[in-house]
Amino acid sequence: MKRRYKSWGRYPRAEQEAVRLWWRNEPFPSHALDGKTALPRGNGRSYGDSCLNDGGVLVDARGLDRFVAFDPATGILRCEAGVLLADILALAVPKGWFIPATPGTQLVTVGGAIANDVHGKAHHRDGTFGRHVRRFELLRSDGARLICSPTEHADWYRATIGGLGLTGLILWAELALKPIANPYIAAESIRCESLDAFFEVSAESDEGYEYTVAWIDCTARGPSLGRGLFARGNHAPDGISNTPRPPGRGFTFPVELPVSLVNGLTLRAFNRLYYNRQREARTQRIVHYAPFFYPLDALREWNRIYGPRGFFQYQCVLPGSDGRTAVHEILERIAASGEGSFLAVMKVFGDLESPGILSFPRAGVTLAVDFPNRGQPTLALMESLDAVVRAAGGRVYPAKDARMSAESFNDYYPQWRELLPFIDPQLSSSFWRRTAGALT
Amino acid sequence: MRRVLIVGATSAIAEATARRLAADGDALFLAARNAEHLQAIADDLRVRGATQCETAVFEATDYAAHADLIEAAQTALGGLDTLLIAHGTLPDQKACEASFETTRRAIEVNALSVISILTHAANLFERERQGTIAVISSVAGDRGRQSNYVYGSAKAAVTTFLQGLRNRLHPAGVQVLTVKPGFVDTPMTSAFAKGPLWASPEQVARGIHRAIQKRKDVVYLPGFWRLIMRVIREIPEAVFKRLSL
């Protein structure tokens, strides 16, 4: 059956068949492949082509959305791979548990979160999502079912976390949740007038705050370059008064716009307004976890705002003390280009090791920026950003990429060949063929 | 807390409905053909809050076993006040045209087996003077069309049977709910191209859950199907027979 499967950035477009999985005891769907390759698919929140398999088959695992077991005493949850983080939170938060290392949307599947070893505002405390995965079951195309954990099939565990879905079908996983007293976050927002101010606030926040991230005005230049609002927070303690109401159902952006609403004019205006929204140097509020972690989930299908050509997201991490200089250079190049986004996000990662061979996060500063797809100029800008990231010894996030060159990939992930023995012969993706495929 | 028997519990609509009942803390007894699938669903429903969740393997056309099934549910749950019948198949119309055996099989699974279970359950609920009987019929039963009239006539039989049953059980205070889903994106319809009229099993489940709570008689799900089917029923037969529907 043909269905229009897109990535979150709605670029590139791909044609592929789909097979849907409904049961975890089903065999690997080799019978439906007709000699083509397959790619496991979660909720399609990857931005680029790591969740596409042009000319092949997608194995849609959203039907695997059952819980298997949950112990409210220990916070150990076992569930199928197509369960959304939103479903887990709806179940676990009222029982006093939260997802450690949650990304900026709760609309991703557990399988996708493992395959991309996702990260979030707690990286400096909790590391990546993969660190909280106790075990999972992997179904290979030859029918083998492997239970993988740090101690059983440990090599497969390392290959599959961050393995971009290429090592097999993840059927279920067991997660260790973290205890909370209530659904609320004690949040602060601090105005940072420059890049230096960001690094200062970030360094002073690492110790006392579980969650940190900054929104950056990526149109600001000169002494204001890197200015933004630094958000930090902790789970609220027991016994707070004046609890905020949980958010409503939000809105769905109704149609794909004929042209992108994001252009030079709206960008500068939005960024200026957003930055100046907060007059005070610091505000403090108690908020529900949903708007704190997932502000964009309230506007469903927000990607439609970018019009039919879609958009790119560029996320890099720049390690070590040179990271500061490199991120300055990157912000300078973005501001000079006039490209840029409503949502530029910056965070300093901690040094907790990521468990996956191909995991993206490492110690350093990470910057994520959306670019509306304006074709060649946008691609040229990102290529020039790659030059900075490569020189700084950093890397770019495959889950958000639709365009990095094979050479860049090789520089970013020199260890990628370690993954080869674990890749299932019947699995592939557009991303993998475009990068590793061009190198072998 | 309801005590619910769900027949055809591994169907996508039944599973989605059961999740809502589990969240209410109901006690559930699930019957379906595949034991492994039943196990997966029962584990899920327990996590989601079901006070109790038991399973039994069940074959729709094993009529002799239907009374036992209801009794097993009663025993396991300590009583029974809600029945949801959701099992069914989507027969291949062309294959039915070519073979009476295929047609008979389709009618047995989609109509006779439902009527058999209803016969036992109706007597029980009438005696106890309480309860809810909800059955998944279909908009396809509202009018015969060349593309699926075997399925449609089975569903029409169920719909009409339920009308009569509702009439009979009303004095006993038993709710009889006829659920008429339109196009629903489930494994049963996986071969179809999906368009804007298609609903998710979750949407349909929300409607069933609400209809049970509000003690409705008949619901179209999603609700716009009530209007569509009214129009379709109004087309004169002389015109209708010329349409390729």
Image: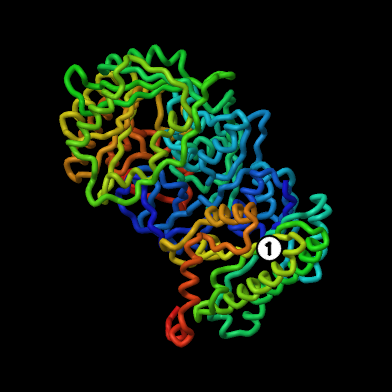
Query: Could you tell me which secondary element the residue under label 1 belongs to?
Result: strand
Return the residue nearer the eye: A423 or A194. A194
Judge from the rendering whether residue A434 lies leftward or rightward of residue B194; answer left or right.
left
Which residue: 49% across, 59% down? B199
Which residue: 30% across, 48% down? A11
Asked where in the image residue A271 lies, by quadrant, the reply is top left
Against B88, residue B92 (above or below) is: below
Q: Position of residue A325 (x, y in %)?
A: 25, 19
> Could one spot residue A436 in this view of the protein?
no
Return the residue nearer the eye: A337 or A412. A337
Question: Would you call the spot at circle 1 few (<14 residues within 10 Å), some (14-19), or many (20 or more)?
Answer: many
Q: Quadrant of the C terminus of chain A?
A: top left
Q: Position of residue A91 (x, y in %)?
A: 59, 37
Total numbered circles: 1
Which residue is labeled 1 in the image? B176
Judge from the rendering whether residue A135 lies leftward or rightward of residue A356; answer left or right.
right
Q: Position of residue A305 (x, y in %)?
A: 29, 44
Q: Position of residue A332 (x, y in %)?
A: 19, 25
Chain designation of label 1: B
Return the residue nearer the eye: B193 or A404. B193
Which residue: 22% across, 49% down? A259
Amino acid found under the numbered disc labelled 1 = Val
Which residue: 47% across, 29% down? A128
Asked where in the image residue A79 lies, by quadrant, the reply is top right
Q: Quadrant of the N terminus of chain A?
A: bottom left
Against A282, residue A167 (above or below) is: below
Residue at far bottom of view: B238
> Could one spot residue A368 in this view of the protein?
yes
Residue at far front of view: B171
Judge from the rendering whether residue B99 lies leftward or rightward of residue B7; answer left or right.
left
